[in-house]
Image: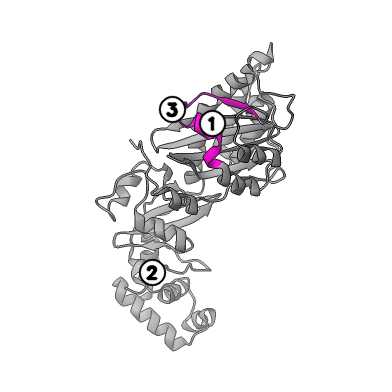
């Protein structure tokens, strides 16, 4: 069980904090609510069923939406339960000087909101009140409340935040705090006790739905690859947000002493500098794909194909797809003689003797030939 998340020194943490993602009101079409699939759920006193109906829709959205789309649809559902004008949600860890955001989303707020917040995070009373052992308890304040730090008040005024309410909960598996803040623009529209109660009821469901959504992200495009793979989602700090069962065991084939909520440091460095290229280690080949402020990582045991240089791999895939030496040469803009050289090298490294073996080797390693072969990430070995 993962309980703590060490992200290093605070100054380093702030430097590496990813920008908040602004949700686009027009990016996703309206979906029919899940409640519409059931007879009788809206009969009678609907006000007594609002939370249950909202959760029915929320869990359906979690399973079928991408990252970012899920957060947008969550806020759309929440507005019917608790009216608000703007919002912010995400996951964070806490250091002595305040929260550090690992992945967050802004609803009806501009990009500058987050960068300006980082300048006042040390005096944000919502962060201090909610993240110091008060998980699950909503905190409310008004911009005219006495005792607010002038910098924080100015930040609220700049973005029209007259009424603020925040709540959070801790996911002990990964040591991450899920938070949500909602805002109203009118001084005459304070959040009520009933609003706070409903807000508190929703937060554990948001955290649970996030888990469903991240798991769905890992399985949505899994496909039928022959080579086994273990998948996970992590952030710019390398902190895991969700992982396949057995992911830890797979990573330990490359890093036997590794354990914890953060992927090994060499992989963190690779994510930050070369996320477009696979990480190729002694035992694993790890693909890293940016997804809505996170990284989807896919770890597979190294295959025979990893022995090839990018050009050798391209040549053997084209040749295995049925092209002649001349056609491969034209595709790769090289001479037929060079193609033969690449193929001889590939045959030797893969232990093959003739063309008839190519399809079997490519298929067994999950790298079946296609019309546009992917470049290999490693050097010739």
- Residue 194 quadrant: top right
The tag earlier along the polypeptide, 3 or 1, is: 3
Secondary structure, mark 3, is: loop
* Residue for point 56% across, 49% down: 292
Left or right of 297 in this view: 247: left
Is any atom of residue 21 visible in this view? Answer: no
Question: Which numbered marker is on residue 378?
Answer: 2
Q: Give the percent coordinates (x, y) of residue 77.
A: 65, 30
Is any atom of residue 365 visible in this view? Answer: yes
Secondary structure, mark 2, is: loop
Q: Give the percent coordinates (x, y) of residue 97.
A: 46, 41
From the viewer's side, name the closer residue of 227 and 172. 172
- Residue 141 quadrant: top right
Q: Which residue is mark 3?
A: 133
Question: Which numbered marker is on residue 83?
Answer: none
Q: CA distance from mark 2 to mark 3?
A: 47 Å
């Amino acid at each position: 069980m993962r309980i703590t998340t060490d992200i290093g020194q605070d100054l380093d943490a702030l430097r590496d904090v990813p920008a908040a993602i602004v949700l686009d009101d027009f990016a996703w079409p309206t979906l029919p609510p899940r409640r519409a699939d059931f007879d009788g759920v809206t009969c009678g006193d609907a006000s007594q069923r609002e939370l249950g109906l909202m959760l029915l829709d929320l869990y359906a959205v979690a399973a079928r939406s991408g990252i970012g789309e899920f957060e947008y649809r969550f806020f759309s559902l929440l507005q019917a339960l608790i009216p608000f004008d703007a919002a912010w949600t995400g996951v964070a860890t806490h250091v002595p000087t305040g929260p550090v955001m690992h992945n967050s989303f802004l609803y009806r707020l501009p990009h500058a909101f987050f960068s300006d917040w980082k300048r006042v995070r040390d005096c944000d009373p919502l962060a201090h009140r909610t993240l110091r052992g008060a998980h699950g308890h909503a905190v409310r304040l008004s911009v005219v409340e006495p005792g607010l730090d002038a910098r924080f008040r100015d930040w609220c005024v700049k973005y029209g935040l007259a009424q603020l309410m925040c709540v959070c909960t801790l996911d002990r598996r990964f040591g991450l705090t899920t938070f949500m803040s909602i805002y109203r623009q009118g001084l005459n529209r304070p959040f009520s006790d009933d609003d706070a109660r409903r807000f508190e009821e929703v937060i554990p469901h948001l955290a649970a739905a996030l888990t469903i959504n991240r798991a769905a992200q890992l399985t949505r495009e899994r496909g039928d690859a022959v080579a086994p793979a273990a998948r996970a989602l992590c952030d710019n700090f390398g902190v895991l947000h969700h992982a396949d069962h057995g992911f830890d065991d797979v990573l330990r084939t490359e890093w036997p002493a590794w354990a914890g909520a953060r992927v090994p440091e060499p992989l963190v460095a690779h994510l930050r500098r070369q996320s477009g290229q696979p990480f190729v280690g002694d035992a694993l080949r790890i693909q890293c794909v940016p997804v809505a402020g996170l990284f989807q990582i896919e770890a597979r045991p190294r295959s025979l194909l990893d022995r090839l240089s990018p050009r050798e791999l391209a040549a053997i895939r084209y040749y295995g797809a049925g092209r002649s030496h001349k056609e491969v040469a034209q595709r790769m803009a090289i001479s037929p003689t060079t193609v033969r050289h690449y193929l001889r090298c590939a045959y030797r490294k893969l232990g093959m003797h003739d063309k008839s073996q190519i399809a079997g080797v490519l298929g067994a390693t999950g790298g079946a030939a296609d019309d546009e072969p992917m470049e290999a990430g490693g050097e010739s070995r």
